Amino acid sequence: MACINCFFSSENQREIKVSCFGYERFEEKIYQYKIKYCEAIPRLVPISDCDCKYNNVINDIHMNWTNDFLQHLQKKISEISNIFDILYETYLLYISKSYKHASDYFWNNIQDMKLISYPENPIFFCRMLFRARVFDSSIELNNPLEYFHIPFNKREFIDNQRFSISGQPMLYLSNSIYSITKELEKNVEDLCIGAFLPNYSIYYYTSKIAEIKNHIFGTLVNSIPGLCAAGSQIKFGYPPNMVPNPNTIVQDIQRSILSEVLTFPTEDKRKFIGEYVLPQIFTTLLIENDYKGIIFPSTKNYNDVMGQHTFSDYNINIAFFTNYEKKNNYDKQLFDSFHIFLMNSRSYDKLTISAVLDKFTGVTNFHKTYAGEVNNNDYLLPLSTAKLQIEYLEKAVMEGAKKYFDTEIGKIELFFYSKLSDKMLDLIKQNIKNSTM
């Protein structure tokens, strides 16, 4: 038996997609995924009848809401499945006719269906992100450009990847160093690592960034239980934009299906990879329509991490698109939109979570004491998001039974969070000084 919570989980959806391995043509995998997905929905049971790890019945309000959601879901299967047909047809048009036929058909449909989503929380743009390169003796470790996008004069080294177009430089960042090791398939000891903090004001007010994410699962497992525990009298459509209602449930689930198909795991890596066609079309269309980037989940297997909070998003990546510059080999405007931190020291062995959080508190207290009316959201919010991410991963274990922040990867992340604290304190001091001049 499965309930809506475990059915929409990333683990379950990955399992369904992997069960489609063995079919030689990707269009057949899409079709089989549709069949398995749609056949499972009528068999879903109330969350109270499921023994999965997401069985988190809060109260009668929660139980009634999830039961109503399940009933609406089961009535909408034929409408929901339409997105599978669009993705199937897009792929067929690409392999049988042309890129233009496929992209026009795809874009027109997802625009009409309003399936492009954006980050629900703009605070995403004030969190520390990570990037790494495989160590090479030629790398200038203290040069931040070494950790930036592949330069424009080195386009020939850019291969086609899932959300990457051959010859098109992009800046790929991840929410965790662990995710980077997965993506690069390297041990952390083999990597040169940098951290990037987006300028909150720049990205909050000006950036148009698409997001590929399973929002349904987040709503069911994270948002709704919290609201019910707080005693909210939930009705469909309240609070706005937080929970699906009968009028938007089809669109919400179709967005999650779009995300799942665009991140379909690869069975084999050959010269032509069918699983990459749809995400590459989507990426190109976003660039053509003035988007600045795309947020997407890693397709790697993370079953070796357990105990993390469902809010952690440690396996989420973001690709920032670059603007060509004739005289420079890098996108200077993009470069200037980040605070960049380099790992110029290995003195992190004795760092602890409590020591880093104490530094965060010290910065916050300094601001309360000396900043007055000076607005330092750009500098305080990054500390808040970093604190949450540490708390979300604090109980996570990996490498057998080792806690995340006791591993080499976790210690390095704490090192960067410590540097973040120092940098934010310096910026707050400078901001105070400037405001009094």
Image (tube, rainbow, N blue to C red):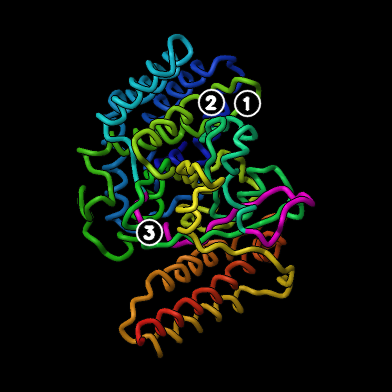
- Name the secondary structure under disc 1: loop
Residue 22 against residue 359 in the figure, above or below = above
Residue matched to label 2: 275
Nearer the camera: disc 1 or disc 2: 2
Can residue 49 be seen here? The reply is no
Q: Is residue 129 magenta?
A: yes
Residue matched to label 1: 267
- Judged from this view, the residue extending furthest toward the front is 327
How would you rate the neighbour count of disc 2 (Cα within 10 Å): few for under 14, some for 14-19, many for 20 or more? Answer: many
Mark 2 and mark 3 in contact? Answer it, CB < 8 Å: no
Residue at x-position 53% and y-position 35%: 168
Residue 100 against residue 164 in the figure, above or below = above
- Judged from this view, the residue extending furthest toward the top is 96
- Name the secondary structure under disc 3: helix
Nearer the camera: disc 2 or disc 3: 3
- Between residue 325 and residue 308, name the one nearer to us: 325
- Between residue 224 and residue 156, name the one nearer to us: 156
Residue range of the region highlighted in magenta in the rendering: 119-143
Mark 1 and mark 2 in contact? Answer it, CB < 8 Å: yes
- Mark 1 residue type: Glu
Residue 370 falls left or right of residue 346:
left
Residue at x-position 57% and y-position 69%: 417
Mark 3 vs mark 1: which is more N-terminal? 3
Quadrant showing the C terminus: bottom left
Residue 112 falls left or right of residue 370:
left
How would you rate the neighbour count of disc 3 (Cα within 10 Å): few for under 14, some for 14-19, many for 20 or more? Answer: few
Mark number, residue 109: none
Residue at x-position 21% and y-position 59%: 233
Can residue 111 be seen here? The reply is yes
- Judged from this view, the residue extending furthest toward the bottom is 369
